[in-house]
Amino acid sequence: MPEICPTVLAADEDNYRIQMERIAGLGHRVQIDLTDSVFAPSKTVDPGQAWWPIGFRADIHLMYK
């Protein structure tokens, strides 16, 4: 069955936290987009800074050269 999965794409830790808090009560899965500004034009938080709510599954979309 298809599943709607919110995506988080945040340029800094504060925005990342805000987005995660916003989706925390909405489901059980999140896609986290991480980019390096080389492979993709924008820069997001680093992979080591990625986290997700307890009980969530996370799909990591890593766009790094």
Image (cartoon, grey):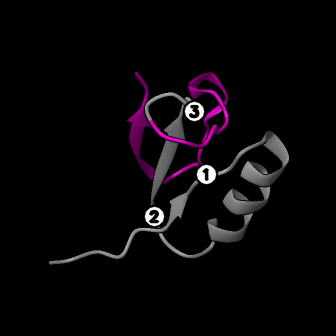
Residue drawn at the location 67% of the way across and 35% of the way down:
45
Q: Position of residue 18 (x, y in %)?
A: 79, 59
Q: Which residue is mark 2?
A: 28
**Vertical order, 28 against 39 (above or below):** below
Q: Amino acid at mark 1?
A: Pro
**Vertical order, 18 against 13 (above or below):** below
Residue drawn at the location 79% of the way across and 41% of the way down:
13
- Picture quarter with the C terminus: top left
Please, what secondary structure does the residue beneath circle 3 have?
loop
Please, what secondary structure does the residue beneath circle 2 have?
loop
Kindly report which numbered mark, 3 or 1, lies closer to the viewer in this rendering.
3
Q: Amino acid at mark 2?
A: His
Q: Position of residue 57 (x, y in %)?
A: 41, 50
Q: Amino acid at mark 3?
A: Ser
Q: Which residue is mark 3?
A: 37
Q: Position of residue 20 (x, y in %)?
A: 67, 58
Q: Earlier in the sequence, mark 3 or mark 1?
A: 3
Q: Are marks 3 and 1 in contact (CB under 8 Å)?
A: no
Q: Are marks 3 and 2 in contact (CB under 8 Å)?
A: no
Along the line of sight, the residue nearer the viewer: 41 or 19: 41
Q: Position of residue 56 (x, y in %)?
A: 48, 54
The stretch of residues the image draws in magenta is 40-65
Q: Residues within 10 Å of mark 3 (few under 14, many from 20)?
A: few
Along the line of sight, the residue nearer the viewer: 3 or 11: 11
Residue 35 shown left or right of residue 23 in the figure: left
Give the alpha-carbon distance from disc 1 to disc 2, as whole Å.
9 Å
Residue drawn at the location 71% of the way across and 70% of the way down:
22
